Amino acid sequence: MHFSHNVFEYCGVADFVIAVRTQITEDHNTLGTRDERLFRRALMPTPRPGVLALEDGSVFRGRAFGAEATITGEAVFNTSMTGYQEILTDPSYFGQIVTMTAVQIGNYGINPEDEESAGGPKVAGFVVRELSPVASNWRSRQDLDAYLRQYGSPASRRSTRAPLPRSSASQAR
């Protein structure tokens, strides 16, 4: 006989309380496993569609965060695993859409003291593979989504694992 029921655990994260569903079954392989999708859904706002359309006609769909805006710019890559706030505020990225190659971005939040230059993001847009649902650094003053909304900068998290193409200039080498 298979038996299952739902148990809700409550944990405080930042200034709000979220419910995490834990499914308990008699099957020893799934005993006490957590449904991570529900946990992430509780932390993340309702997703908005985001689209990155390249000049060559390639279209990459994802989930938007940050400000609601339509922008144009040169798509560039950054392979750093940390320092996303410094990248966002670096004047050398002005007007560019920066795509981060690291798996998860946003996990340590935003601290105004860590800006590369004052006045918020200089990038036109920001693309990540996965946005962290929690900013877990003690120095964090706000999460990445709120920071980008504050300064009117749009961003997208990719819902596809397909790699973005290299430009024709880099392929010609």
Image (spheres, grey):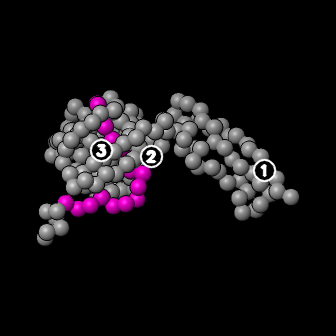
Q: Nearer the viewer's eye, disc 2 or disc 1?
A: 1
The residue that label 3 is drawn on is: 126
Q: Residue at image x 73%, y 43%?
A: 7
* Residue 74, x across and y down, in percent: 18, 48
Q: Residues within 10 Å of mark 1 (few under 14, many from 20)?
A: few
- Disc 2 marks which amino acid? Ser
150 and 54: which is toward the camera: 54
Q: Quadrant of the N terminus?
A: bottom right
Task: Residue type at mark 3: give it.
Answer: Phe
Vertical side of 102 occupied by 53: above or below: above
Mark 3 vs mark 2, foreground winner is: 3
Quadrant in which the C terminus is drawn: bottom left
Q: Is residue 45 magenta?
A: no
Q: Main secondary structure of the magenta part?
A: loop
Q: Which mark is residue 4?
A: 1
Give the residue type that dot 1 points to: Ser
Residue drawn at the location 51% of the way across and 34% of the way down: 14
Question: Badge 3: how crowded within 10 Å, few (<14), some, or many (20+)?
Answer: many
Q: Are marks 3 and 2 in contact (CB under 8 Å)?
A: no
> Which residue appears at 29% of the width and 33% of the height?
69
For residue 94, which quarter of the picture?
A: top left
Element at label 2: loop
Q: Residue furthest right?
A: 1
Whole-number angstrom distance, CA of label 3 to CA of label 2: 14 Å
| Residue at the disc numbered 2 | 132
Measure the C-alpha gap from mark 3 to mark 1: 42 Å
- Highlighted magenta segment, given as a residue range: 151-167
Crowding at label 2, few (<14), some or many (≥20) Cα neighbours within 10 Å?
many
